[in-house]
Structure formats: structure tokens, C-alpha cells
Image (spheres, rainbow, N blue to C red):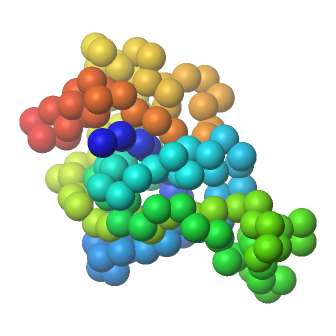
Amino acid sequence: MKYWLMKTEPEAFSIDDLQKRGTESWDGVRSYQARNNMMAMKLGDRAFFYHSSTDVIGIAGVCEIVREAYPDHTAFDPESKYFDPASSQDKPRWYMVDVGFVEKFSRIVTLSEIRETPGLENMFVTRRGARLSVQPVTPEEWEIILGVAHR
């Protein structure tokens, strides 16, 4: 099993939305590195659900990969804000995965808390300019974050 961190703006899609729906497609990713990370995801992999661009930035809970990467249909839809005329159904450029709800933490594990926690100094999300929306998390980082969240 691999571990990941997936960023979203809670005004667009939050951990509460995922909890209500149960499962959801993670569409609209338009970064090649993030796309490649999603293409590396396997069924059962776990991801931290990270709220960005909000008052309290940080990890809100956990989701699980319930469907491996498949073409992102929003790239083919001219009405979508994620439309990409260079992507076609024959040669898709963008992919998405489906995630399922696992757990909402009782509180957000904040970015500042992550930065201050020993063992997380090299976590990708703590790096300046680390805007990547889908990032790997090491097993050690995963366990440390869970420990912080469940205190």
C-alpha cells in the first residue's frame, strides 16, 4: 500500500462532501506530476484529505482509492472549466481516480502543526512552493500524522 496527500479547496469539495457522498471522482487535476501520481495509485491506497486555500489549512481526514486512474471526462467537455481541447478520448491527456470516505478527523491537523512535528521536516507539503495537488507521503509520515490527528 502507498500513501498520498490530495489537496482540495473545501468550498469546491470538502471532507464533509465526501462523507455525505461516500465516493467521488477526483477530477480536474491539470498538473502532469499530480496526474502521474494519480496514475501510480492502486486500489486500497490511502490518502490524506487536505483542505487548502481556506482559513484553517491542513489535513481534514482520510480517503481511500476505490477506482484506479481512468480518463478525466471533464477534459472532453467544452462546458467544463477543466476542458482541454488537446485531450481526446482516443488520446486522453488527463486522468482521475475515485476516492472513498474513510475518516474525518475530529480537528484539522494544520500545516503549521505539520511543520512543527518532529519526523515531518521533509514532508512534501511542508516545502516552500509545494503546490502540487497530489503528492506522495512516506509510511513514516503517514503514521506520525495519524498519531497527531488521534491525540
**Residue drawn at the location 46% of the way across and 50% of the way down:** 41
**Residue drawn at the location 54% of the way across and 51% of the way down:** 38
> Is residue 105 shown to the viewer in this render?
yes
Direction front: furthest residue: 90
Direction left: furthest residue: 151
Residue 36, above or below 91: above
**Residue drawn at the location 43% of the way across and 43% of the way down:** 5
Rendering coords of residue 80 (x, y %)? 75, 80
- Quarter of the image for residue 20 reads bottom left
Rendering coords of residue 62 (x, y %)? 29, 53
Q: Nearer the viewer, residue 150 or 88?
A: 88
In the drawing, does residue 72 fall left or right of residue 60?
A: right
Residue 134, above or below 68: above
Rendering coords of residue 111 (x, y %)? 41, 34
**Residue drawn at the location 67% of the way across and 77% of the way down:** 73
> Is residue 10 shown to the viewer in this render?
no
